[in-house]
Amino acid sequence: MAFKPGQLTGMVRQKMLKYLSLTLIQFFLIIIAQASQSETLGLGRVATENEIKAWDIDIRPDGTGLPIGSGSVLSGEEIYSENCANCHGDFGEGIDRWPELAGGFDTLNSEDPVKTIGSYWPYLSTVWDYVHRAMPFGNAQSLTDDDVYSITAYLLYLNDLVDEDFELSDKNFASISLPNQTHFFLDNRNVLENKLFVERCMKECKPETKITKRAVVLDVTPDTTTEKLAIEEEVQKEPTELDAQLVKDGEKVFKKCKACHKIGVDAKHGTGPHLNNIYGRIAGSLQDYKKYSKNIKSAGENGLIWNLETLSSFIENPKIYLKGTKMNFKGIKKSSDINALLEYIKATASLEN
Ligand code: HEC
Ligand code: HEC
């Protein structure tokens, strides 16, 4: 807390006193807690110096934590091509979808920024630390410290930041700065943004939240109805548990689908595929329905399976939930209608075709 003593108003002073007394209480609580902890439970042991050393490998932006060592661009090229190039490419261009490690300058404020060590990362220490800690992928921490210096030097070279005769060491490490460093700054919301939002609503702010879009297939949007649906899904296994009134209501709603979809005994395909056994069906997977769009088939190949949740989102807004299908239907907005429809489908769709 950066208070200037001369500027303390009465309010602030009061708050400070409150704060201080709270801190004192916390202080005593900690002492008490420690006292009771010292009556040991006889569990565990003190970590050895070597254990701590093996774990404490982080490198700070100023180079603190670096081991003594060095490595050149030239030796780095060799080590890199043996250990890294098959994923990241000979020149850091990235093979297939593996990350790019070089280039991307002048792309950061474009629509499609290429964030590499050279274009984006603020500190060289992160490069050293990350390569040392996590790479090569699948064989992490197999490199010696000098290997990591060499590779880091080579990565600088790939990003046009040093010449080919450059050698990196713990001595000259702190003298290297990356181009984008100055564009990172300390979080200043405290001074800038807080002023803009004087009164914040912290609870019961909006009467209801409406979900307008869902992440397709992945189901990453938490949904308050999910739990309910999961329970309904359990119930689904017990056909006797159907709600007769809901089924009846749902039959009426199904009229909206009827022009294109048949359901029940001997249902045939129409404009759309029949909906028997729809729960558990992979989207776009019925072999004898020939009119599927490419999009619904590929959604199925990517893992979309019809269950209470996916079906309900689809019916609510087919065009938004699944782009580019041939189902020309604007959706059902009322969730009570959707629930009834789902119940009707549940009751009918389980019939064998
Ligand atoms: C088997 C493939 C593979 C190999 C080999 C490999 N990497 Fe990686 N590398 C990856 C993957 C995957 C990631 C992304 C990991 C993540 O995001 O969790 C990555 C991330 C990185 C990153 C961070 C990139 C960024 O911008 O976030 C660096 C730096 C890196 N690797 C360097 C190396 C170096 C140096 C080597 C050789 C010593 C190496 N990698 C070997 C697959 C590989
Ligand atoms: C105007 C015709 C039409 C209407 C109305 C319609 N659908 Fe469809 N539906 C289709 C077509 C066509 C497809 C195939 C989509 C594709 O391949 O892109 C389809 C696909 C589906 C699928 C995916 C089936 C599968 O095998 O993957 C489901 C589920 C579905 N509709 C349910 C419904 C429900 C429930 C309703 C009523 C609320 C409804 N549809 C209304 C034409 C329609």
Image (cartoon, rainbow, N blue to C red):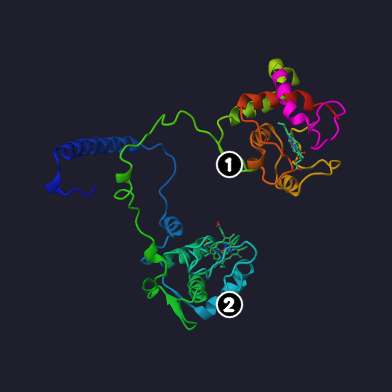
Task: Give yes or no for contact between labels 1 and 2 (Cβ–Cβ under 8 Å).
Answer: no
Front residue of 233/323: it is: 323
- Please give the label number shown on residue 78: 2
Q: How many marks?
A: 2
Is residue 242 in view from this perspective?
A: no
Q: Looking at the rendering, which quadrant does residue 38 occupy?
A: top left
- How far apart marks 1 and 2 lie (CA) works out to 43 Å
In the image: residue 195, left or right of residue 183: left
Dot 1 corresponds to which residue? 220
Q: Which residue is farthest left?
A: 6
| Side (left or right) of 263 relative to 45 | right
Q: Amino acid at mark 1?
A: Val
Q: Which residues are magenta?
A: 248-276
Helix, strand or loop under label 1:
loop
Where residue 136 appears, as percent x and y from the top left, is 58, 64
At label 2, the amino acid type is: Glu
Disc 1 residue crowd, few under 14, some 14–19, many 20+, Cα 10 Å: few
